[in-house]
């Protein structure tokens, strides 16, 4: 019997990785971070567990729409990354389910707070501050001042020089709206957005598209998360960034288990793994990402913007993540801002 057990163990070790993965099962991972980050997360979990990962990447707004469309027949197991507001909305609509990992106590306060506020339906995996990106070469060549404050963006010199994503598909752009509403009040915020519209040359679907356009010299300025600007600068592009002087909002990149997941056990295993310091360090380094990770054991990467030194508002995730409030603000933006001529 002992010889048989040893032989069986030896044969298991000799199996190719694909065969072991098949035995471990599979995971359908929905990811709303950039593909450059989604892939290391998927590969890291596969290496650690032998579980085969099928990856789908879309922006948070698009992924929320997909979850709604698949509500009666869920195809995804876990949703990782992307701004937290759509995750909060998904939980409120019963599209995700509560889960408590033993690692909750290892997380920063902002990640734990999101988990408590949503009654365990979503948890923070990273955070980043909202600000501006600008192409240093274009700004100098066109004799434009580098923006430092929200008020600066209304400078007539910026007409046609600015990009912001479309809030209907981009969680980043929705956070812009929610941040301005919380800072200014709703009426002044929408007046500001109407004035800002005249400077905007495009509303791309993805939240990272504006800073990519800045880095490639396709536009001078963007409203972006500052870690994205820092990443472009580290990659060698002429990109600078600023955190608005009046204050700003921030994102909590989140993770949720999809209700009715076909591979629920593997979804919970991924959830626990993804909150670990080792997984977060490895994936963020491989992807060269500069967000603040949610596990307190993850050090801030060199060149990463420091949330502790930014003037950030007390962002109301519960209110602005609620699906009713989100739909209302987006409908108002469509009617009063998005429909304006350019």
Image (tube, grey):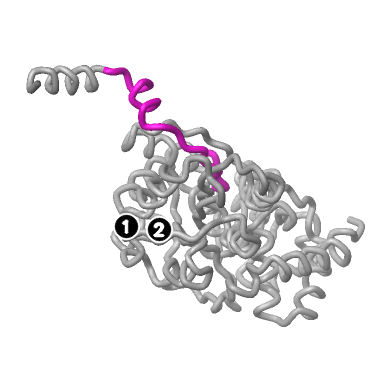
User: Marks 1 and 2, Cα distance to the nearest angstrom?
Assistant: 6 Å
Secondary element at image label 1: loop
Is residue 98 visible in this depiction of the protein? yes
Which stretch did the figure color magenta?
Answer: 15-35
Q: Which mark is residue 185?
A: none
330 and 50: which is toward the camera:
50
Instruction: Residue 329 in the image: state x and y as whole percent.
Output: 76, 68
Instruction: Residue 130 in the image: state x and y as whole percent.
Output: 58, 64
Secondary element at image label 2: strand
Between discs 1 and 2, the one toward the N terminus: 2
Answer left or right for 284 relative to 119.
left
Q: Residues within 10 Å of mark 2 (few under 14, many from 20)?
A: many
Q: Residue at x 36, y 32 (%)?
A: 24
275 and 135: which is toward the camera:
275
Q: Which residue is mark 2?
A: 293
Q: Which residue is mark 1?
A: 298
Q: Is residue 16 magenta?
A: yes
285 vs 149: above or below: above
Q: Residue at x 41, y 42 (%)?
A: 266
Answer left or right for 266 relative to 73.
left
Q: Residue at x 71, y 54 (%)?
A: 165
Q: Quadrant location of the C terminus?
A: bottom right
Q: Quadrant location of the N terminus?
A: top left
42 and 28: which is toward the camera:
28
Q: Residues within 10 Å of mark 1 (few under 14, many from 20)?
A: some
Instruction: Residue 29 in the image: state x and y as whole percent.
Output: 51, 41
| Image marks 1 and 2: residues in contact by CB distance under 8 Å | yes
Instruction: Residue 251 in the image: state x and y as whole percent.
Output: 55, 63
11 vs 324: above or below: above
């Amino acid at each position: 019997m002992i010889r048989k057990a040893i032989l069986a163990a030896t044969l298991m070790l000799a199996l190719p990785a694909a065969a072991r993965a098949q035995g471990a099962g599979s995971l359908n991972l929905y990811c709303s971070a950039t593909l450059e980050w989604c892939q290391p997360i998927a590969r890291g979990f596969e290496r650690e567990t032998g579980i085969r990962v099928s990856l789908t990447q879309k922006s948070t707004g698009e992924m929320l729409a997909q979850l709604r469309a698949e509500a009666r027949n869920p195809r995804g197991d876990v949703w990782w990354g992307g701004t937290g507001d759509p995750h909060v909305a998904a939980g409120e609509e019963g599209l995700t389910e509560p889960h408590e990992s033993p690692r909750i106590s290892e997380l920063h306060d902002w990640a734990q707070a999101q988990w408590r506020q949503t009654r365990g339906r979503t948890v923070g995996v990273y955070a980043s501050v909202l600000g501006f990106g600008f192409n240093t070469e274009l700004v100098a060549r066109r004799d434009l001042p580098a923006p430092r404050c929200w008020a600066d963006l209304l400078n007539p010199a910026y007409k046609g020089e600015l990009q912001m994503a479309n809030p209907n598909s981009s969680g980043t752009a929705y956070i812009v709206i929610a941040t301005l509403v919380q800072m200014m009040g709703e009426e002044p915020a929408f007046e500001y957005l109407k004035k800002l519209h005249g400077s905007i040359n495009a509303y791309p679907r993805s939240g990272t598209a504006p800073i990519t356009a800045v880095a490639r010299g396709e536009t001078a300025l963007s409203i972006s998360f500052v870690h994205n600007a820092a990443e472009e600068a580290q990659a060698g592009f002429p990109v600078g960034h600023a955190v608005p002087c009046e204050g700003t909002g921030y994102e909590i990149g989140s993770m949720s288990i999809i209700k009715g997941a076909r591979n629920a056990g593997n979804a919970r295993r991924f959830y626990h793994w993804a909150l670990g310091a080792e997984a977060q360090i490895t994936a963020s380094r491989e992807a060269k990402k500069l967000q603040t990770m949610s596990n307190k054991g993850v050090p801030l990467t060199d060149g990463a913007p420091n949330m502790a030194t930014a003037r950030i508002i007390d962002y109301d995730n519960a209110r602005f993540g609620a699906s009713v409030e989100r739909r209302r603000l987006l409908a108002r933006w469509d009617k009063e801002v998005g429909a304006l001529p350019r």
